[in-house]
Image (cartoon, rainbow, N blue to C red):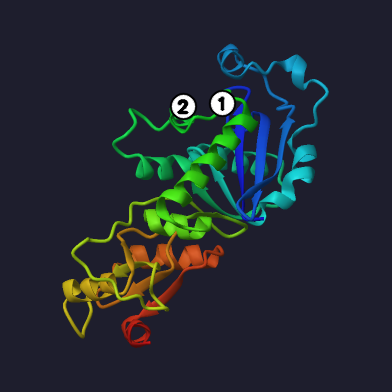
């Protein structure tokens, strides 16, 4: 499977109140399946949400709760790439449900078709909401129908691949300068494009460092911090200013802020995949 597009609808303002999910699987750039499940949220419905998606308590009365549905859809969230429109919301719904029912977390990297659309049609559209995009792309769409929303996500990706002359979602995301988010047993961090490289920099890709996110703590001994930063940027590194789970490396230099270092150590002890390295280790990587 190339990727899965998905969308949740909720019964109320709570992230734990999913009442429907739509999923579209794409294989070899063609839709392989499209399915939708009603979910009994085991929570009250708000009139506002009912007016938005027209799902009522009566409609979900005989539907399974999320654990029942999760048993059916879990394979689609195991070692896969998933997309949603404004994925920050949908992935938080998924995480809230996993936490609520104490289920095993998925193993996914996730992307956002809203972020993609904002790059692909930056100045052409008044906004990048799904109804606007569906109209622009000339496809039928029923807003807030979970399956219909997921199908529009697929169309955004398909058009994006044509526009950027890419053949897969990984290449598409790289072409648009967006980084995938991750959600698994150890990591949960968002998809974003805040790590923007300076266009003046000529990037010579370093296999060990290209597209890695590094937080630099302290001052180097072998060069100035500005020189080090320039070298990292030239080898395809994204520089992050804060310690968080999205990091690949934490570079510990002289006069390193102890509080930030302790935060990094704590995150690694909790299972974060980042590595803590020193200046000599980094220099060896830069040469490699």
Residue at mark 2: 135
Residue at mark 1: 141
The part of the image, by quadrant, that contains residue 230 is: bottom left
Q: CA distance from mark 2 to mark 1?
A: 8 Å
Across and down, in percent, residue 25 comes to: 66, 46
- Nearer to us in this view, 29 or 88: 29
Is residue 60 visible in the rendered image? The answer is yes
Q: Residue at x 46, y 26 (%)?
A: 135
- Nearer to us in this view, 129 or 164: 164
The part of the image, by quadrant, that contains residue 102 is: top right
Across and down, in percent, residue 203 comes to: 28, 71
Contact, mark 2 vs mark 1 (Cβ under 8 Å): yes
Across and down, in percent, residue 134 comes to: 49, 30
Is residue 245 visible in the rendered image? The answer is no
Q: Residue at x 40, y 66 (%)?
A: 262
Q: Secondary structure at mark 1?
A: loop
- Local packing at callout 2 (Cα closer than 10 Å; few below 14, some 14-19, many 20+) is few
Image quadrant for the N terminus? bottom right
- Local packing at callout 1 (Cα closer than 10 Å; few below 14, some 14-19, many 20+) is some
The part of the image, by quadrant, that contains residue 8 is: top right
Q: Residue at x 65, y 17 (%)?
A: 45
| 2 or 1: tag closer to the N-terminus | 2
Would you say 83 lies left or right of 191 here? right
Q: Residue at x 58, y 28 (%)?
A: 14
Q: Secondary structure at mark 2?
A: helix
Residue 65's disc is none
Exactly how many numbered labels are in the figure?
Answer: 2
């Amino acid at each position: 499977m190339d990727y899965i597009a998905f969308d949740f609808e909720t019964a109320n303002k709570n992230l734990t109140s999913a009442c429907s999910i739509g999923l579209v699987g794409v294989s070899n750039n063609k839709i392989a399946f499209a399915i939708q499940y009603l979910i009994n949220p085991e929570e009250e419905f708000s009139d506002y949400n009912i007016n938005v998606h027209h799902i009522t308590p009566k409609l979900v009365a005989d539907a399974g709760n999320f654990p029942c549905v999760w048993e059916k859809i879990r394979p689609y969230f195991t070692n896969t790439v998933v997309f949603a429109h404004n994925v920050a919301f949908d992935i938080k719904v998924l995480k809230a449900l996993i936490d609520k029912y104490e289920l095993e977390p998925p193993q996914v990297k996730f992307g956002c078709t809203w972020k993609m659309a904002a790059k692909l049609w930056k100045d052409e559209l008044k906004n990048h909401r799904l109804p606007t995009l569906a109209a622009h792309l000339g496809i039928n769409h029923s807003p807030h129908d979970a399956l219909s929303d997921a199908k529009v996500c697929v169309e955004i990706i398909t058009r994006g691949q044509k526009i950027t002359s890419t053949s897969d979602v990984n290449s598409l995301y790289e072409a648009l300068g967006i980084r995938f988010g991750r959600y698994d047993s150890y990591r949960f961090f968002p998809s974003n494009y805040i790590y923007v490289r300076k266009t003046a920099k000529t990037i010579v890709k370093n296999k060990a460092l290209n597209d890695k996110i590094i937080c630099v703590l302290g001052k180097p001994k072998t060069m100035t911090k500005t020189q080090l930063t320039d070298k990292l940027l030239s080898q395809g590194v994204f520089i992050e200013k804060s310690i968080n789970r999205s990091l690949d490396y934490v570079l510990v230099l002289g006069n390193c802020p102890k509080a930030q270092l302790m935060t990094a150590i704590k995150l690694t002890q909790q299972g974060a995949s980042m590595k803590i390295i020193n200046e000599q280790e980094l220099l060896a990587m830069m040469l490699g």
